[in-house]
Amino acid sequence: MLTDPIVQEILIDITHDEESSVSVIGCILSGVTSDFDIAEETGINLTIIRKVLYDLHSAGLATYNRIEDPDNTGDIYSWKFKQERVCEIIQSKYVNISAEIEKSIKYEEENMFFVCKSNNHRYKFENASDHNFECPICGDSLKHQDNSKIILELLKEKEAISSMVKLNINSII
């Protein structure tokens, strides 16, 4: 799971620290659960480990149990990584991306566009009409743009994202 690039991307987004987060989670998954033991196992500074753990906890990816230290040197925190939440986060991320692509598709389908060949600026019909179909920047004539290729690319991207989510969720589970 931790070698999956999508999972690593999610962890980087959450912890802002790829190497440490993967190492910390790897330790937890292998049974090393206290922050002190993780620091000893990985050689990573305890402060960094705690930051990663707190970031994961804030994102709902880690839980902890606090145990009073019998040596009375403070409390011991035992951490658990919630793998099932990774799938939920990935699904949520791609649902949001898919929704944005859907908005773009709708925008492209509902509008007519004109483009300036000189500078590639693109204008909706209303804006082009307001400027008498002349580029407000350079004065060149605006030409109608067939955006069917853009719509087709957006549809392909949406399908690819949908397939990617299914593939990644199945490989993580």
Image (cartoon, helix red, strand yellow):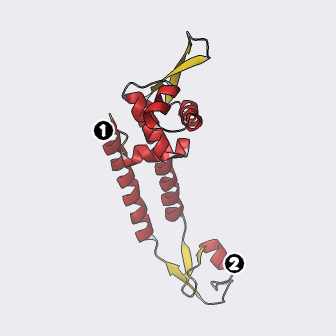
- Calculate the distance from the C-alpha at mark 2 to the C-alpha at mark 1: 51 Å
User: Residue 86: x, y in percent?
Assistant: 43, 36
User: Along the line of sight, which residue is nearer the eye, 27 or 167?
Assistant: 27
Say left or right for 59 vs 168.
Answer: right
Q: Are marks 2 and 1 in contact (CB under 8 Å)?
A: no
Report the residue at 55% width, 9% height from top. 70
Judging from the image, what secondary structure is the residue with disc 1 in? helix
Across and down, in percent, residue 55 comes to: 57, 35
In this rendering, the answer to whether 103 lies above or below 93 is below
Residue 5 versus residue 114 in the image, above or below: above
Residue at the image point whose x is 30% and y is 40% from the top: 171
Q: Which residue: 51% across, 64% down?
A: 108
User: Which one is in front in this view, the residue at disc 2 or the one at disc 1?
Assistant: 1
Q: Which residue is mark 2?
A: 130
Res. 37 in view = yes
Residue highlighted by disc 1: 170
Residue type at mark 1? Asn
Mark 1: give few (<14), some (14-19) or many (20+) Cα within 10 Å: few
Name the spot of residue 145 as percent of width and height, x first: 49, 77
